[in-house]
């Protein structure tokens, strides 16, 4: 029997976390992520878990660090202004090699901005979010079903690589209601982590460090991180490409914008325009391999559509290394794209 | 052959790594007191210590129990997450006055108001030690620091924060005390307070915090003995010793 349920994107994230065995949530209210916060507040105690409202996002992310050090699956969530405050904890989690999941339901910035949707936290997320030389894995879901599945995947990846993982949602995805099929994923009872601190008992003690003791240790530490990030780059690129064969233009869009762009691309194809769509799902690592395949397939023009003033275009350009023409269409926060609007851009860009 | 009798040894909860501290610094004494209490309560096997930023940043090398490093001021938040995830563990933070009373003010006030079942060892020496003697929130009025070489002027840079009093106002289920380590009598009283701050956690009675008045001869520009004398003459009059709250009915 199917268990398809109509739910908000923010709730789908919560369902994915519970299914992945997350039993600890620490966070601070901020719109437009509140439904996720409230979902966890209601559901975690029912599942024997712990929900705690922190005094700030700063405290929340460090509570996550403590819980992660204790070896449990844990999560926090926020939006732009609060996500900025979490940068300090993200770099500490990465340094300590601790697994945790952080959800950013983006809203329009800069500054306090407004609660309208935007994709303006792309750069902050994909560049780690804090100081120092580190990365977070960043996943960019495009539907409620994907919010559910990619949140679940985020916990798996966090544990696999012992590193923080960001799920980059936005106000549109978080607030939109869609049917979600829950049975696509098994319920997990996460395995115990042998490195976690619980009190040493009769064993040698463990230390979870956010700083090395010597310069030499620091060099080794950064070498280890670099190697890990190279492995993630190799193994975890995710993307979706459609209507690529014979396309003269490919639209590149992620998250909520990719859903709108999909309609525009369909409309363009109905009008006989040779247009395809490329949707990055892992935002870090950016799906460079997929971009290279497009170049090999002879695509020479790319239209990057994103709800910001031009952030993902930097990664598209890096992936293409000047080998193709890249145009960007973006509107900063406060604006929701209409399919017709993107269709007009496609018409102007296609040759 | 005379029998050798052991009268003094390293606490079992302490490693044999030498202290990195300056001569006359109180951290060594306080580390030892914490370790002795851990031995006496037999909790080293289930204790998890949280380090802070500052002079004591490397004290994960001194305590022979599980340790987690926290960033500047965030110890109480890390301890909260850890204790909630592993309630069977005995969780303590070890924080200086820059860490706890400046950058970490938010975290400590809310951990105290939630009466988190954690123990806080709060070392108050009135200056930022590791960074070179800048003004701390606890620096006394007119005391000279590298931030304000002419001395602390409260109209310009505020009054010294009395954290033990302040926290006892927001934390009904707690043991909060201020002690000093300037002489043997007070060192013994400090040990008793540390023991109680761990005991209230172990008995699930509440939050425990001991503010310990300490010497920093290097940044006070005094020799070790004069520094101890200064605690007695200048620091204690502003920071009175005592118990500010207790979760035990008989103590109220």
Image: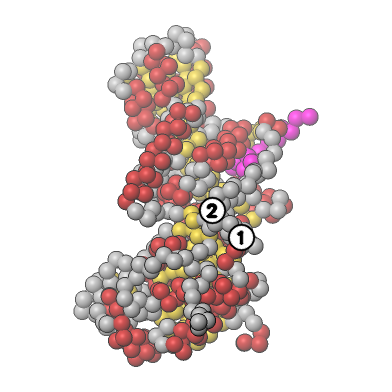
Q: Which mark is residue A284?
A: none
Tell whether B115 sits left or right of B164. Answer: right
Q: Which mark is residue A69?
A: 2
Q: Quadrant of the C terminus of chain B?
A: bottom right
Q: Residue furthest front?
A: B1
Q: Is residue B139 above or below residue A189?
A: below
10 Å neighbourhood of mark 2: few (<14), some, or many (≥20)? many
- Closer to us: A212 or B23: B23
- Closer to us: A13 or B248: B248
Q: Residue furthest left?
A: B150
Q: Is residue B164 above or below residue A53?
A: below
Q: Residue furthest right?
A: A1
The answer to whether residue A66 shows anywhere in this view is no
Residue A324: image x %, image y %? 32, 18
Query: Reading the chain from its start, which is encountered first: label 2 or label 1?
Result: 2
The answer to whether residue A246 shows anywhere in this view is yes
* Residue A14 is a magenta residue: yes
Colour scheme shown: secondary structure
Tell whether A126 sits left or right of B167. Answer: left
**What residue did someone put label 1 on?**
A201
Report the label total.
2
Q: Which residue does the image show at 58% across and 38% down from the upper left? A: A156
Residue B141: image x %, image y %? 30, 83
Tell whether A179 sits left or right of A326. Answer: right
Quadrant of the rendered image containing residue B27: bottom left
Tell whether A139 sits left or right of A295. Answer: right
Residues in magenta? A1-20
Per the image, label 1 sits on a secondary structure element best described as loop
- Closer to us: A341 or B161: B161
Circles 2 and 1 in contact, beta carbons < 8 Å: no
Q: Are marks 2 and 1 on the same chain?
A: yes
């Amino acid at each position: 029997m199917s268990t398809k349920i109509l739910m908000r994107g923010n709730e789908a994230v919560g369902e994915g976390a519970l299914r992945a065995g997350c039993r600890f949530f620490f966070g601070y209210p901020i719109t437009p992520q509140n439904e996720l916060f409230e979902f966890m507040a209601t559901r975690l105690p029912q599942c024997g878990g712990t929900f705690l409202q922190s005094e700030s996002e700063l405290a929340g992310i460090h509570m996550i660090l403590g819980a992660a050090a204790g070896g449990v699956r844990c999560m926090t969530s926020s939006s732009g202004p609060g996500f900025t405050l979490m940068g300090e904890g993200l770099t500490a989690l990465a340094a300590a090699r601790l697994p945790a999941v952080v959800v950013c339901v983006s809203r329009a910035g800069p500054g306090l901005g407004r609660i309208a949707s935007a994709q303006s936290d792309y750069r902050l997320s994909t560049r780690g979010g804090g100081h120092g030389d580190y990365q977070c894995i960043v996943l960019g879901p495009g539907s409620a079903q994907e919010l559910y599945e990619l949140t679940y995947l985020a916990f798996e990846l966090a544990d696999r690589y012992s590193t923080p993982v960001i799920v980059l949602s936005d106000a549109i995805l978080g607030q939109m209601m869609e049917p979600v099929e829950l049975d696509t994923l098994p319920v997990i009872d996460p395995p115990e982590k042998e490195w976690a601190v619980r009190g040493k008992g009769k064993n040698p003690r463990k230390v979870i460090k956010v700083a090395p003791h010597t310069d030499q240790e620091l060099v080794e530490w950064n070498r280890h991180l670099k190697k890990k990030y190279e492995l993630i780059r190799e193994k975890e690129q995710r993307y979706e490409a459609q209507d690529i064969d014979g396309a003269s233009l490919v639209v590149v869009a992620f998250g909520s914008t990719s859903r709108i762009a999909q309609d525009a691309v369909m409309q363009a194809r109905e009008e006989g325009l040779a247009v395809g769509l490329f949707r990055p799902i892992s935002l870090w690592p950016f799906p460079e391999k997929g971009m290279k395949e497009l170049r090999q397939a002879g695509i020479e023009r790319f239209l990057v559509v994103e709800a910001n003033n031009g952030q993902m275009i930097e990664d598209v350009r890096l992936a293409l290394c000047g080998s193709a023409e890249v145009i960007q269409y973006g509107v900063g926060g406060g604006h929701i794209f209409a399919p017709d609007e993107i269709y007009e851009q496609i018409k102007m860009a296609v040759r | 052959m005379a029998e050798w009798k052991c009268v003094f040894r390293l606490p079992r909860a302490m490693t044999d790594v030498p202290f990195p501290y300056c001569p006359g610094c109180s951290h060594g004494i306080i580390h030892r007191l914490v370790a002795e209490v851990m031995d006496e309560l037999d909790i080293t096997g289930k204790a998890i210590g949280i380090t802070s930023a500052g002079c004591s940043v490397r004290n994960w090398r001194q305590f022979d129990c599980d340790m987690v490093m926290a960033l500047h001021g965030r110890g109480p938040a890390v301890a909260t997450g850890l204790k909630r995830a592993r309630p069977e563990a005995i969780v303590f933070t070890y924080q200086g006055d820059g860490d706890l009373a400046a950058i970490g003010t938010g975290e400590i006030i809310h951990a105290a108001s939630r009466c988190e079942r954690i123990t806080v060892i709060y070392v108050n020496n009135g200056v930022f030690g590791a960074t070179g003697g800048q003004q701390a929130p606890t620096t006394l009025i007119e005391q000279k620091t590298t931030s304000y070489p002419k001395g602390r002027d409260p109209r310009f840079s505020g009054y010294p924060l009395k954290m033990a009093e302040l926290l006892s106002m927001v934390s009904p289920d707690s043991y909060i005390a201020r002690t000093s380590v300037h002489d043997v009598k007070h060192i013994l009283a400090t040990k008793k307070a540390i023991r109680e701050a761990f005991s209230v956690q172990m008995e699930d009675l509440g939050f425990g915090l001991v503010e310990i008045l300490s010497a920093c001869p290097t940044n006070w520009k005094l020799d070790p003995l004069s520094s101890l004398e200064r605690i007695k003459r200048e620091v204690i009059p502003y920071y009175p010793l005592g118990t500010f709250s207790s979760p035990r009915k008989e103590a109220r």
